[in-house]
Image: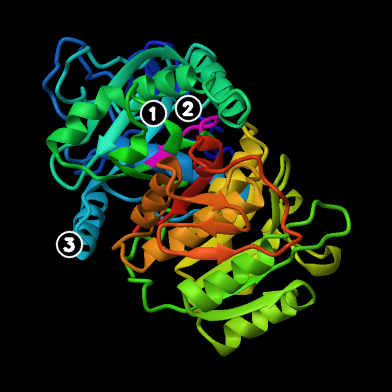
């Protein structure tokens, strides 16, 4: 089931009332409600025991997801499949609930930060919903994610923390309604002129994505939220979700994972790692980035330690050679990067002299030998809301072989980028996780602690002189979420 190349189906088999989930094998006759696969009888002592989707009872508000966690594994595998198919990668082994919780416990012990993984999925209407007010989910998370997207699919949240059973919340809203609001959220938050229009969609998205699990997060003292998002939601600025009084980053650090099984979740303290900072400020067919020379200097020489390459020195050969000489744990690329619709080759990082490092070539850099702990793209953007562009952006860490990637959903002003990046690295020296360093940098922007004063950019710890030819700015501070919510941490948040 789920692989049509091997005597199977491309997806699930459903009669509407009963469903046989994908990614299972049935070597013998099997009956599922009013569906029957007719084959030879099973003569083994141990019977085949596929997942039963029919055991959910809408009146059972207290029955937890069973410890065999088959539904949780399957959901994560379905997300992994999105990226494996897009990038043409071999399938990886799935991950169990026990392994997931061990990862969360290990990283909590290393960092002191309690984290949770939140799967945001659209489920078919045929899947039994969770009764409102239920403490935990009925036992039918298997095939919870819709394999054939329909506008009527229902929003579902699955919360996994280090202890206890997964918690599932059904949200009474359809795929069509959520995606329409997500698009409105993206459009309004990127319009810095109409500086209040983003609040209603930011609030509504919070009501759907966070409020149903807010009490669960508070009860467990969760501080970091790792989101695994369904199609159409991977390019929303999570940091700008708004509860009516506060943005989400005022209470949690947040980030995206393509899937848990595709993420290198091992913790490594990056505070002793050096940085390789490269970039370009001039381009033949793109807008110049006059802030890049200052950005590279500040990051590699002032707030961190490392080596920098600018313009003519920003070549693929220098990028490879520098990593061969020094095992830089952080690679910072200050240049245009585009995540476009279509195949991975359509997305790229701009090098010097119109040369492009395409997304499908990044695995050739061997950034996993040894592992790059953090890749930063400080001037990138993605085609917001486009499924394939989202896969490229959120699959960046997977495709490049790094543990974590920090990128921007849209292009931000030079001084805004310089302010956030400087503040991010300042906080990275003192924070136990990369996600927390990003949160503190975003909070500094939100609170007006990063601002331009004449020919200087002021951050919480630095006063950076700007060159005479640096573009003038009408923005004296960068508190609007346009400037800080686009920056998103992808992959390992620790």
Q: Residues within 10 Å of mark 2 (few under 14, many from 20)?
A: some
Q: CA distance from mark 3 to mark 2?
A: 40 Å
- Which of the two discs, 3 and 1, sits closer to the camera? 3
Check the image and report above or below for 283 versus 131. below
Relative side of 242 to 166, left or right: right
Could you tell me residue 267's position as x and y percent? 31, 66
Q: Earlier in the sequence, mark 3 or mark 1?
A: 3
The secondary element bearing badge 3 is classed as helix
Instruction: Name the residue beneath numbered marker 3.
Output: 109
* Residue beneath the point at 71% across and 74% down: 310
Instruction: Name the residue beneath numbered marker 1.
Output: 143
* Residue beneath the point at 23% across and 38% down: 47
Front residue (pair 184, 82): 184
Could you tell me residue 136's position as x and y percent? 17, 25
Quick check: marks 2 and 1 in contact, CB under 8 Å? yes
The secondary element bearing badge 1 is classed as loop
Q: CA distance from mark 2 to mark 1?
A: 9 Å
Q: Residues within 10 Å of mark 3 (few under 14, many from 20)?
A: few
Can residue 38 be seen here? The reply is no
* Residue beneath the point at 33% across and 51% down: 95
Front residue (pair 75, 38): 75
Q: Residue 231 colored magenta?
A: yes
Report the span colored magenta. Answer: 227-233
Q: Residue furthest bottom?
A: 325
- Which of the two discs, 3 and 2, sits closer to the camera? 3
Q: Which mark is residue 12?
A: 2
* Residue beneath the point at 28% across and 39% down: 251
């Amino acid at each position: 089931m789920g692989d049509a190349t091997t005597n199977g189906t491309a997806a699930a088999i459903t009669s509407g009332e009963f469903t046989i989930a994908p990614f299972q094998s049935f070597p013998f006759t099997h009956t599922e409600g009013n569906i029957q696969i007719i084959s030879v009888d099973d003569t083994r002592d141990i019977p085949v025991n596929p997942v039963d989707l029919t055991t959910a009872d809408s009146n059972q508000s207290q029955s937890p997801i069973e410890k065999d966690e088959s539904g949780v594994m399957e959901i994560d595998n379905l997300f992994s499949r999105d990226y494996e198919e897009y990038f043409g990668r071999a399938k990886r082994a799935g991950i169990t609930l026990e392994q997931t919780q061990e990862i969360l416990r290990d990283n909590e012990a290393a960092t002191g930060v309690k984290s949770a993984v939140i799967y945001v999925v659209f489920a078919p209407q045929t899947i039994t919903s969770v009764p409102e007010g239920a403490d935990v989910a009925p036992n039918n998370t298997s095939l919870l994610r819709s394999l054939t997207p329909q506008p009527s699919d229902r929003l579902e949240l699955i919360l996994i923390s280090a202890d206890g059973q997964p918690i599932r919340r059904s949200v009474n809203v359809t795929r069509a309604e959520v995606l329409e609001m997500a698009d409105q959220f993206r459009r309004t938050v990127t319009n810095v002129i109409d500086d209040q229009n983003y609040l209603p969609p930011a609030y509504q998205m919070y009501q759907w994505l966070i409020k149903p699990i807010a009490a669960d997060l508070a009860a467990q003292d969760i501080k970091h939220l790792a989101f695994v998002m369904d199609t159409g939601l991977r390019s929303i600025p999570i940091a700008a979700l708004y509860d009516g009084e506060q943005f989400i980053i005022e209470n949690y650090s947040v980030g995206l994972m393509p899937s848990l099984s595709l993420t290198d979740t091992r913790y490594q303290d990056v505070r002793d790692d050096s940085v390789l900072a490269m970039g370009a400020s001039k381009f033949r067919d793109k807008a110049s980035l006059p802030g890049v020379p200052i950005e590279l200097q500040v990051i590699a020489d002032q707030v961190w330690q490392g080596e920098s390459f600018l313009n003519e020195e920003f070549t693929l050969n220098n990028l490879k050679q520098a990593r061969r000489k020094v095992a830089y744990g952080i690679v910072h690329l200050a240049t245009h990067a585009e995540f476009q619709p279509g195949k991975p080759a359509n997305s790229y990082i701009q090098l010097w002299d119109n040369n492009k490092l395409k997304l499908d070539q990044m695995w050739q850099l061997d950034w996993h030998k040894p592992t790059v702990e953090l890749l930063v793209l400080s001037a990138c953007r993605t085609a917001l809301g486009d499924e394939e562009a989202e896969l490229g952006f959120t699959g960046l860490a997977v495709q490049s072989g790094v543990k974590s990637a920090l990128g921007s959903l849209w292009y931000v002003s030079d001084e805004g980028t310089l302010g956030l990046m400087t503040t991010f690295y300042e906080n990275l020296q003192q924070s136990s996780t990369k996600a927390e360093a990003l949160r503190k940098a975003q909070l500094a922007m939100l609170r007006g602690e990063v601002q331009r004063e004449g020919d200087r950019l002021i951050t919480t710890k630095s006063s950076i002189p700007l060159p005479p030819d640096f573009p003038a700015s009408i923005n004296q501070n960068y508190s609007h979420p346009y400037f800080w919510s686009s920056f998103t941490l992808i992959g390992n948040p620790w």
